[in-house]
Image (tube, rainbow, N blue to C red):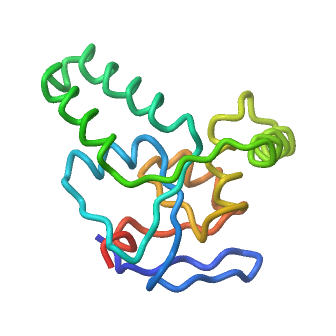
């Protein structure tokens, strides 16, 4: 795992790894649960409201594909609800997501909602989804998973 540092943003923003608010997406939330990652007490996780529904859909897809048993998937769902996560979905974040999606020609606002929350309420985005990371790279600062445990 890379060092718990935060990448600097092309605009010149940089954030320290000590105390921070991180946006995570559904695949990353499921990774935290599956690997029993304990988030450092000094950090706060934030996400758009849709994260829990997306995580549940990913669990269902894993069960249907035979990657998880239903029992394991439902246990992970329960653990998701135990993770302290500030959910946001206000008018400003939704409007910002709309603007990001329109400016970048995206077909929907799902990824843009994570980036909007990051722009408005967090220090950096942490994701294990390479596609989202690539989309986000020139819009918001990115941090490594290791930043969560510090």
Between 118 and 41, the residue placed more toward the observer is 41
44 horizontally vs 148: left or right: right
Q: Answer above or below: position of 39 versus 30.
A: below
Looking at the figure, which quarter contains the N terminus? bottom left
Between 128 and 125, the residue placed more toward the observer is 125
Please report the residue visible at 19 percent of the width from the left and 54 percent of the height from the top: 36
Please report the residue visible at 13 percent of the width from the left and 23 percent of the height from the top: 71
Looking at the figure, which quarter contains the C terminus? bottom left
Q: Answer above or below: position of 61 versus 30.
A: above
Please report the residue visible at 67 percent of the width from the left and 43 percent of the height from the top: 113
Across and down, in percent, residue 109 comes to 71, 34
62 horizontally vs 17: left or right: left
Which image quadrant for residue 40?
A: bottom left
Please report the residue visible at 32 percent of the width from the left and 19 percent of the height from the top: 60
Which image quadrant for residue 5?
A: bottom left
Q: Answer above or below: position of 4 versus 26.
A: below
32 horizontally vs 24: left or right: left
| The furthest residue to the top | 64
Across and down, in percent, residue 78 comes to 25, 35
Q: What number of labels is visible? A: 0
Across and down, in percent, residue 117 comes to 66, 53
Across and down, in percent, residue 20 comes to 51, 75
């Amino acid at each position: 795992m890379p060092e718990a540092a935060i990448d600097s943003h092309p605009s010149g923003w940089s954030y320290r790894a000590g105390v921070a608010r991180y946006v995570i997406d559904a695949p990353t939330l499921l990774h935290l649960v599956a690997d029993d990652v304990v988030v450092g007490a000094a950090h706060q996780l934030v996400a758009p409201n849709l994260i829990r529904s997306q995580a549940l859909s990913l669990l269902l897809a894993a069960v249907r594909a035979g990657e998880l048993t239903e029992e394991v998937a439902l246990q992970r769902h329960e653990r998701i609800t135990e993770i302290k996560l500030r959910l946001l979905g206000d008018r400003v974040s939704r409007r910002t997501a709309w603007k990001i999606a329109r400016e970048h020609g995206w077909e929907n606002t799902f990824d843009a909602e994570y980036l909007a929350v990051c722009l408005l309420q967090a220090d950096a985005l942490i994701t294990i989804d390479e596609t989202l990371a690539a989309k986000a790279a020139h819009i918001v600062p990115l941090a490594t998973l290791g930043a969560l445990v510090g």
